[in-house]
Image (cartoon, rainbow, N blue to C red):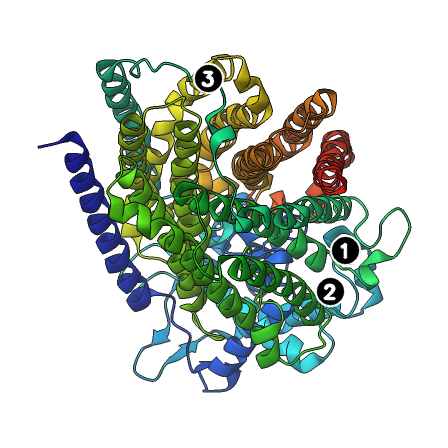
Amino acid sequence: MKKEKKLWIAFALVMSISFSVLGYYGYEIYQKAPPVPDKIILADSTVIFTGQDIKDGQNVWQSMGGQEVGSIWGHGAYVAPDWTADWLHREALFILDKLSQAAYQQNYSKLSKEQQAAMKIRLQNEVRMNTYDAVNKTITISKNRQEAIAYLSRYYEGLFMDDPKFDQLRHDYAIPKMSIKDKARMHKMNAFFFWATWATVTNRPNDTISYTHNWPGDELVGNVTTKSLLVWSGVSIILLILCTGILIFHHVKSGEDEHLETPVSDPLLKQGMTPSMYQIKKYFWVVSLLIVLQVIFGVITAHYGVEGNGFYGIPLDEILPYAVTRTWHTQLAIFWIATAWLATGLYIAPAVSGKDPKFQVFGVNFLFFALLVIVLGSMIGQWYGVMQKLDLIDNFWFGHQGYEYVDLGRFWQCFLLVGLFLWLALMVRPLIPVLKRGSEERNLIIMFLISCAAIASFYAAGLMWGRQTNLAISEYWRWWVVHLWVEGFFEVFATVVIAFLFVRLGLLKTKTATLNVIFSTIIFMSGGILGTFHHLYFSGTPTAVMAIGATFSALEIVPLVLIGYEAYHNYTLSKSTSWIIDYKWPIYYMISVAFWNFLGAGIFGFIINPPIALYYVQGLNTTALHGHTALFGVYGMLGIGLMLFVMRSLYRHEIWNEKLMKFIFWSTNLGLLAMALMSLLPVGVMQAIASIEHGIWYARSAEFMQQPVMIVLKWLRAIGDTIFGFGVLALCYFIFELTFRKTKR
């Protein structure tokens, strides 16, 4: 049996088995998600909240910005607290004081250690007992808990509305006055906060751990680490070591790549240019402008961490609150990176066949303007949603969905999905004649089209939740988009595109490239698909999800161990012949991608991968550290590299400004590194220590985050941001100068 055929069989098995398991446990999540009751009642049947209050409250939270204003179950932004950890700790202290006053006529803090221990046991017996009645669909709570709800409802009402006592806290949390504009909405959001917190401390039926696997940690209520957290963390580390050894053995056994005579001249000089290929430059104009916008909103967002209600004295939060700037910052990152990659695909497809199918130019131009409408329309809708100018239904469709990375309204999601299938059609049509010819590149093109089809279709996972879907179920589907779509199939697409470009340059044999691409995809997807679960350890999922997520997410790190070889291989290619110097900077960006894959996705990713680690650091700046160095470091740098490859081919006779390109390369990479090492990493480490010692509630509190040393570390981020920002501005200038220089001739 041919090696290619064996690899295709292995690929099919990995995909079918992995998605079967993912689907099965998705079904389990549906069945075992924390229940939303019809009513929350006292023992005398007095209704505290209705189920509709909880569902509407989830929508109110989403309209305010949702996971862009603090977090729920650890997923979201980092300036404000995790509201479930915050509510849980404040509720615990309130009830402990009530119990202590009743028993000893003193507040809890005044008791002896023995007395405090007795009060904690009484508290845990009260809050951990699962009182959900599946027949009547009610949750019964104690009088103490009802009084805690009333107390906390007043607290959050003051915080999110306009009580002057909370001015300083609003400043620290970057929450504008009147984020919620009426008490009816506030009552409903408090209902949602209570339910989400109830799930973090209430034991699952016939079990001793909560729905969120005892997260967030808080020893007052008995939320402590479990045996399974330790066991599966150990298993993941052992598997990482084992599989790394196996992969290194396979790499050594397979030997070096076959020697290939380097072409004496650039093969792309002989490549014909079709009309649709010339249309791609406008995509790169938009990409460069979106990068600049993303960096601007990133600077503003980071600054809110030290000046929560303004920007150097300007009360910016009145028109651009933190929820808006952070939403736009994260969303624009995905938009410009995806646009750069999609544009590269639109360039490559007709380049392979050498001609455009009918209406290809129209399709490329139509898709461009459709993407512009989606970007601008979704941003405007999100602003209207956060500013509370939409009702809850309109907000869901056109405003802010409140889920990090999938914030755009449902209408814009549908619009984008249609755009992705249009892009898929534009990719498939030019390649059909090539596939029919049965060329040597056939298998490489098939894998290319599989990745394109997956990019188009898997975004549909974002449509699988509704306006009032249980949060645990919404999180399951959201990570299909964030992990499988962004981190999964875009990764496969990138692997194929890079291999294809090197084949076209005559630096890699087609057969070698095909085998490497299929093998790499198998290795990556073996851990990547089921590794989706490592985002869901504490999101109201069954305990089996932790076992599978921990096991397979460790395998995601395995291919990154050999990333240095890939970097060195690309470096040697950049020195292989005289004409390849024209592609020096695109190749250098491929080398930087390897570096960031190892550091950002590998090291910083594994910091938050094992369950025992994530238990303490979920929702801290360690996540932001991984997010910045992996999203921009890997996908962003790759997007820039692919864009430069296409620009080099489009403007093949133009002389590039080498000094400018050197400045762009080093400033973007060193700026990102400085941002990570001087600010995000030390802040994350200090938060992790605080979380281990006291709990997530303290690591995210204003008391901890507003300490002088933390403020200094936040300000230090400005150094890396500035270096990085100048590099981005220079990149934007380079793209426009190059394209308009050519236009003028």
Which of the image's four quarters has the C terminus? top right
Task: Say which residue appears at 36% left-offset and 67% top-offset.
Answer: 130
Where on the picture, by quarter, is residue 541? bottom left
Furthest-left residue in this view: 1
Where residue 219 appears, as percent x and y from the top left, is 48, 47
Where on the picture, by quarter, is residue 651? top right
| Front-lying residue, 432 or 625 | 432
- Can you identify the residue that label 1 sits on? 169
Where on the picture, by quarter, is residue 203? bottom left
- Can you identify the residue that label 2 sits on? 159
Where residue 363 appears, as percent x and y from the top left, is 51, 61
Given the image, on which type of amino acid does mark 2 rest?
Leu
| Front-lying residue, 357 or 214 | 357
Mark nearer the N terminus (1 vs 2):
2
Where residue 317 appears, as percent x and y from the top left, is 81, 59
Mark nearer the N terminus (1 vs 3):
1
Task: Say which residue appears at 51% left-offset and 76% top-offset.
Answer: 54
Label 3 to label 2: alpha-carbon separation:
58 Å
Asked if the residue at tag 2 contacts the one at tag 1, i.e. Cβ–Cβ closer than 8 Å, the answer is yes
Which of the image's four quarters has the N terminus? top left
Instruction: Judge left or right: residue 224 versus residue 665.
Output: left
Local SS, label 3: helix
- Can you identify the residue that label 3 sits on? 573
Instruction: Judge left or right: residue 558 versus residue 111.
Output: left
Local SS, label 2: helix
Q: Nearer the viewer, mark 1 or mark 3?
A: 3
